[in-house]
Image (cartoon, coloured by chain):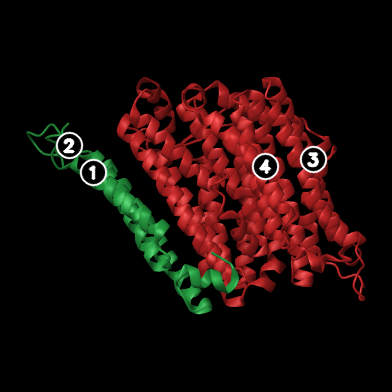
């Protein structure tokens, strides 16, 4: 496999590290959630890339086709996307509540108020 | 007929009960449903445990689809044992929860609270019963998402930030697990744990297998709260509602440890996971640091829920040490400590919940004279504390005894020293509370003011269980030893 042939995987690594870096480095609670989203999205692409089979067709039974792409990773990732959406929704809901009680979504400001975070 | 459906009922009953809770949403009704569903889960898990001990592994194909295509549930002694721990703790703590939750959570939120509780129970039971690696991830997220909600319901505003922090770290952990499972799937083309165990040895010497293993263990390390990945735990347990602290402290990390055991021993196999990979050394070092550092930090906590939370991090260290020994004796000690720690932390957090209900605080300075004002509650705390230290005739002694024996058997005397040092540190942090409650000058008003019976009875049940399993070891040690032998002997 050439470097270009692994294009998907390079993107996965790039996205994963970008998302992870945003989660760690950003002091803004909303941006952290966005970073988390990127991080999860990279894993979705990883799974979907695994499902592709060289010269494989769309996994719908038809005459004259012997190689099909693997549909299972797609199904798995549909579930994982649902999980990701729920996590984002819950995370953002928590941020709203934090904003209501601290008046800020900045980590430093919240830490200054009562040492949490 | 119904017996054949037990594995499905184990998960489906709390799941449907959660939906019912949401629809009814009246606090009393929601509590009743939660309690009833917990009792049914407990009965189901006990029946399964008995069946497994009598006649071996139960296989269950969901929806009648055979294993590689459908999702298989597979209950062996280890699963049944963990299921029993989770559902029993949920039952006992839910009795305590009725009054505690009524005082800590606004009436219109109580229905949602119990819904989240039942979903969390569903997730934890699902993790412990499933034989499918991806299904495990889904249940992990069900339990995690609902536990974020439960923690955020704490009355202090810091509960929100604690839940947020847990959400970020927990999601990273779960996503790591997802990556690990994905890499294993890419390598073997299966998600069924039995098939994974059969196909992995051929391809174990590949970078993909090693990377997948690394992602899984780091992700699980976050969920277990293994030092230094424990940062989410102290705040989460400290600011969660009392009942939630008791429930999660006794179950959540235990289930995550079970998953680690399942992957290390059943899926990857001991030779790969603890031989070819440096996991044993990593667990031994991190476990030792966890025991020593978290116990030391616990000594300096003024908030006692936080103190117990740090103590939980230390207990995870003991569990990790038992695994790192890579011997059946060490594994027996870990499994035994899973159960015993659930009993002692359950008792301690429930006792703190009673105190918080009565005096509205869990800070050490408010404990002066509490030994006379709430003698029964403090009695539970003392029994739980003794068990946590590992005094003979309590459950904590048994598991530490087995752990020390296993370490000596292997010739790892530094681990023995760490275990004993950790116990001595536990003496200090428990003694601070006892001293304050019994010996400090009590404030002027010292009339007796106990918690209500519905809180004291579950607290004493847990305390008595600590004493019972400290002197009657046949049952707990017997099951743990058989479970350990099963993990060492064969595939899942």
The image quarter in which residue B214 lies:
top left
| Residue B3 visible in rendering | no
Q: Is residue B376 above or below residue A109?
A: above
Which residue, given by chain and number where applicable, does mark 3 sit on?
B390
Chain A palette colour: green
Q: Residue at position x 66%, y 48% from top? A: B294
Q: Nearer the viewer, residue A6 or B127?
A: A6
Q: Secondary structure at mark 2?
A: loop
What is the residue that sits farthest to the left in this orientation?
A64
The image quarter in which residue B418 lies:
top right
Kindly identify which chain the residue marked by label 1 belongs to.
Answer: A
Kindly identify which chain the residue marked by label 3 belongs to.
Answer: B
Whether residue B212 sits left or right of residue B291 in the image: it is left
Q: Label 1 crowding class (10 Å Cα cut-off): few <14, some 14-19, many 20+?
A: some
Of all chains in the rendering, the one displayed in red is: B
Between the C-alphas of marks 2 and 4, the distance is 46 Å
Q: Secondary structure at mark 1?
A: helix
> What mark, if any, has residue B237 been given in the picture?
none
Q: Is residue A79 above or below residue B238?
A: above
To the question of a shared chain for discs 3 and 4, the answer is: yes
| Residue B187 visible in rendering | yes
Whether residue B235 sits left or right of residue B277 in the image: it is right
> What mark, if any, has residue A10 been given in the picture?
1
């Amino acid at each position: 496999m050439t470097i270009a042939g692994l294009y998907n995987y390079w993107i996965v690594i790039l996205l994963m590290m970008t998302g992870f870096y945003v989660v760690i480095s950003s002091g803004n609670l909303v941006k952290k959630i966005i970073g988390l989203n990127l991080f999860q999205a990279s894993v979705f692409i990883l799974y979907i890339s695994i499902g592709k089979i060289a010269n494989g067709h769309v996994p719908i039974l038809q005459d004259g086709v012997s190689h099909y792409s693997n549909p299972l990773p797609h199904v798995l990732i549909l579930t994982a996307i649902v999980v990701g959406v729920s996590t984002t929704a819950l995370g953002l809901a928590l941020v709203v509540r934090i904003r209501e009680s601290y008046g800020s979504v900045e980590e430093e400001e919240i830490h200054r108020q009562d040492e949490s975070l | 007929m119904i017996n054949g459906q037990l594995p499905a009922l184990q998960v489906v009953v709390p799941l449907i009960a959660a939906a019912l809770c949401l629809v009814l949403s009246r606090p009393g009704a929601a509590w009743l449903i939660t309690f009833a569903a917990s009792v049914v889960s407990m009965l189901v898990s006990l029946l399964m445990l008995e069946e497994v001990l009598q006649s071996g592994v139960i296989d269950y194909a969901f929806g009648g689809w055979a294993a590689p295509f459908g999702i298989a549930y597979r209950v062996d002694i280890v699963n049944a044992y963990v299921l029993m721990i989770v559902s029993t703790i949920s039952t006992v703590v839910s009795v305590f929860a009725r009054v505690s939750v009524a005082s800590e959570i606004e009436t219109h939120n109580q229905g949602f609270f119990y819904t989240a509780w039942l979903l969390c129970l569903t997730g934890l039971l699902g993790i412990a019963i499933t034989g499918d690696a991806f299904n495990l991830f889904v249940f992990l997220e069900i339990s995690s998402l609902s536990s974020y909600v439960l923690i955020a319901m704490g009355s202090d505003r810091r509960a929100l930030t604690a839940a947020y922090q847990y959400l970020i770290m927990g999601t990273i952990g779960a996503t790591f697990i997802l990556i690990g499972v994905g890499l294993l799937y890419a390598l073997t083309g299966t998600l069924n744990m039995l098939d994974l165990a059969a196909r992995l040895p051929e391809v174990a010497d590949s970078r993909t297998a090693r990377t997948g293993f690394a992602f899984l263990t780091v992700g699980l390390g976050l969920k277990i709260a293994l030092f230094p990945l424990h940062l989410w735990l102290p705040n989460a347990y400290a600011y969660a509602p009392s009942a939630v602290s008791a429930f999660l402290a006794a179950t959540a990390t235990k289930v995550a440890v079970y998953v680690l055991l399942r992957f290390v021993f059943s899926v990857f196999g001991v030779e790969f996971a603890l031989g070819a990979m440096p996991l044993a050394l990593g667990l031994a070092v991190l476990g030792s640091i966890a025991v020593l550092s978290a116990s030391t930090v616990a000594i300096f906590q003024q908030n006692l829920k936080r103190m117990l939370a740090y103590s939980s991090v230390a207990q995870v260290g003991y569990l990790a040490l038992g695994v790192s020994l890579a011997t059946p004796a060490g594994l027996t000690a870990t499994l035994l400590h899973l159960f015993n720690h659930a009993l002692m932390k359950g008792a301690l957090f429930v006792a703190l919940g009673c105190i918080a209900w009565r005096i509205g605080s869990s800070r050490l300075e408010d404990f002066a004279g509490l030994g006379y004002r709430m003698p029964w509650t403090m009695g539970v705390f003392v029994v739980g504390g003794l068990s946590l230290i590992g005094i003979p005739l309590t459950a904590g002694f048994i598991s530490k005894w087995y752990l020390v024996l296993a370490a000596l058997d292997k010739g790892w005397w530094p681990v023995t020293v760490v275990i004993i040092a950790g116990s001595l540190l536990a003496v200090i942090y428990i003694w601070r509370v006892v001293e304050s409650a019994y010996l400090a000058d009590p404030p002027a008003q010292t009339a007796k003011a106990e918690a209500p019976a519905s809180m004291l009875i579950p607290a004493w049940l847990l305390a008595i269980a600590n004493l019972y399993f400290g002197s009657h070891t046949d049952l707990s040690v017997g099951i743990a030893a058989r479970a350990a032998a099963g993990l060492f002997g064969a595939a899942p």
